[in-house]
Amino acid sequence: MATITPSNSQSGRFLAGPMPPVGLHEGTYTSTYGATGSRDEVAARTHQLSLLLEVNSALAGALDVESVLGPILSRLADRERLTHARIYRLDEPAAELQRVAYGGRNGGSQRVVPLKDRSLLAWAIRQQEAVYVPQVNIDPRCQEFDESDRSAYAVPLMTSTKSLGILDVATDQPDGIRSVTRKLIDQVATQAALALERSELYKQLRVSEERFRSIFEQVSFGVVLAKLHGEFSAVNPAFARLLNSTCKELEGKHFAEITHPQDAAAIEGWVQELLEGDAGQVSFERRYLRKSSEPVWCATNITLLHDAGGRPSYFLVIVQDINERKKTEEERNRLQQQLFQAQKMEALGTLAGGIAHDFNNLLSVMLGFASLARQRLSSDDPLQDSMGMIEESAQRAAELTRQLLGFARPERQQVKPVCVQEVLNRVGRMVERTFDRSINVEIHKGAEPLWVNVEPSYLEQALLNLCINARDAMPKGGTLTIQMDPATLEALQQEFPVTCTPGDYVKISVQDTGSGIAPETLNRIFDPFFTTKEPGRGTGLGLAMVYGFVKNHGGFVHAESEIDKGARFTIGLPLIPAPAAQAGVGLGHVEPGHGTVLVVDDEPLVRAFASEGLRGLGYQVLVAENGRQALQIYEQHHGKIDCVLLDLIMPDLSGLETYRQLRAQDPQVLVVFASGYSTGGILREAPEAKLAAFIGKPYTLEGLSVALHKAGVGQPRCE
């Protein structure tokens, strides 16, 4: 008697095994099923038990169970004299039984059995109970069986949770399927059900693993499986591409090796928080290093995975490239900062405008009466020098007021073509004369003259402010370098404001070898009133004035610095063609005159100076303290007033509105506007005002006389 031994559990093949021991004496024995019988019966049952053991062994080691079931059923059919032995798998969605294995000479028929059929198999699976049919030919449920089949037995393949299929057998033996054989079939069915369940779970696991592997390898964001100490166990291709590496190069590396040094400590802290705390995951944005050491911003999510016992086992890390988003955010922040800077400058410009207006009125009085007093003194009078010093101080104060307006207001102040080399010469001479000898001054002007359209004193003051800051950054000496170069901006560059259009520029840089500027300070360096100097040494307006000056002239200013490596400030102004040579124009001497001038100003002291000064020049003077009074006086003296000296900034009725109403009375009215502001905005609001002359406050007696003379006061008017 041979036994069935699996030679390869994967293939399901069986070979003949050793014969059991012989020499058993005759008698009765207790079988495994609890019955007693003759020696032949016990031997038969022993063979059945041996078969069950081998079936169990074959199924237990098989992953592809269906390939093993066929040989088992064939052996079962041969051993128990069955015409067929078949196993069907239940497909609930399709509502049918599908044959997966068979053995015996008649087992190849009927591949699919619909559950709605009235067949024996369908009935047994619906009832979920074994069915023995002793006489197939008289049972209507067995119409599909072979004509030679006499008895049939169907056993559902059941687990503790569900039905998996059915095992059915048939025989052509006259005595049918014995009870002991049916018990064997029951045992085989039980083993097959467990094996099918295990096989199904294995297939589901394999599908799950394949699905996970597919997702792992094809997902567009980086996925990393890391050990608890941070070493990579597996990385997906997306993560490798993100760092310009291969999966093989990254596996086994530690997170610290690919993390930007400035972010490494924070990541270690979050990992420790995961291991020690209750948080299941953490999210953050940090920089990683590519193979070329180039940093890349990534959004990272770390989840702590646990094993079946609840112990921490791995970190699942999801990494997404946000480098472009970060660049966009940085660009948006840069534009916001420029907008905030512009808004601050606009607010400060409004404040400065109000202050400058009052200052210019006061300075007009000081400068005017000083010039008036100097005119009345003899040339050798000792007070001439004193009056001259008063005038000079007032002029310097007026220049400071104009600069205060210029750095914040969008108006250009009397711009004209200026040769940059000449400005550098003047600034260079001033710096070399006044700076400490421990500071070496180097000026590189280039050979070709370069021209810009600016107010000369503003450009000089901007460069002086930069030089003074450079000097203060080198208390122990160093090198101050001023360099001028032409430059062409073909497209907008990140460090330049959006208002800076492409074109040809003159770049002037002021560089020092001082202590440098910290990054957090560099971001605020152009803020008004922000200074790093000690109290009493800085107002915080120098660089703000530089910023306002270049912005108002369509240029740019850029600061670069490193700690202990000095700083470089670069201003750029639009380049213009060299103008034709022009003769210099001066104020000239006091110009006496004649005629009647209506002085309109809301400031009493300004009216007093203008009135007294004009009378001294030979003019007759009428005065008005506001626009409405001026209109009344002009109407009363119609045809007798030769010129109106009109303040632009007045309460109630502005100078511009007064001018319009004066022109309504007399289209030929002659007006000289007086203001501490530029006329650019006035002319945009009222193009007709371009016919009027203009004199800036504060003005001297000489300046006033020249302005009236150029306006044609006292000359015949065209009718």
Image (cartoon, rainbow, N blue to C red):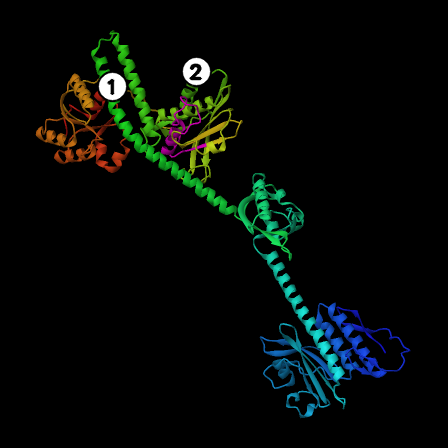
Q: Within 10 angstroms of label 1, few (less than 14), some, or many (20 or more) residues?
A: many
Indicate the quadrant where residue 219 lies. Answer: bottom right
Marks 2 and 1 sit apart, C-alpha to C-alpha, by 31 Å
Image quarter (top left, top right, bottom left or bottom right) of the N terminus: bottom right
Q: Within 10 angstroms of label 2, few (less than 14), some, or many (20 or more) residues?
A: few
Q: Name the residue under label 2.
A: 433
Q: In this view, does 148 lie above or below 465?
A: below
Identify the residue shown where x is 69% and y is 85%.
132
Identity, as a three-letter code, of the amino acid under mark 2: Arg
Image quarter (top left, top right, bottom left or bottom right) of the C terminus: top left
Q: Is residue 557 magenta?
A: yes
Q: Is residue 539 magenta?
A: yes
Identity, as a three-letter code, of the amino acid under mark 1: Met
Percent from the top left, x then y, of residue 522? 46, 32
Q: Mark 1 points at which residue?
A: 366
Q: What stretch is highlighted in magenta?
A: 530-558
Is 389 or 679 nearer to us in this picture? 389
Q: In this view, does 154 lie above or below 250?
A: below
Is residue 570 found left or right of 645 in the rendered image? Answer: right
Percent from the top left, x then y, of residue 623? 14, 25
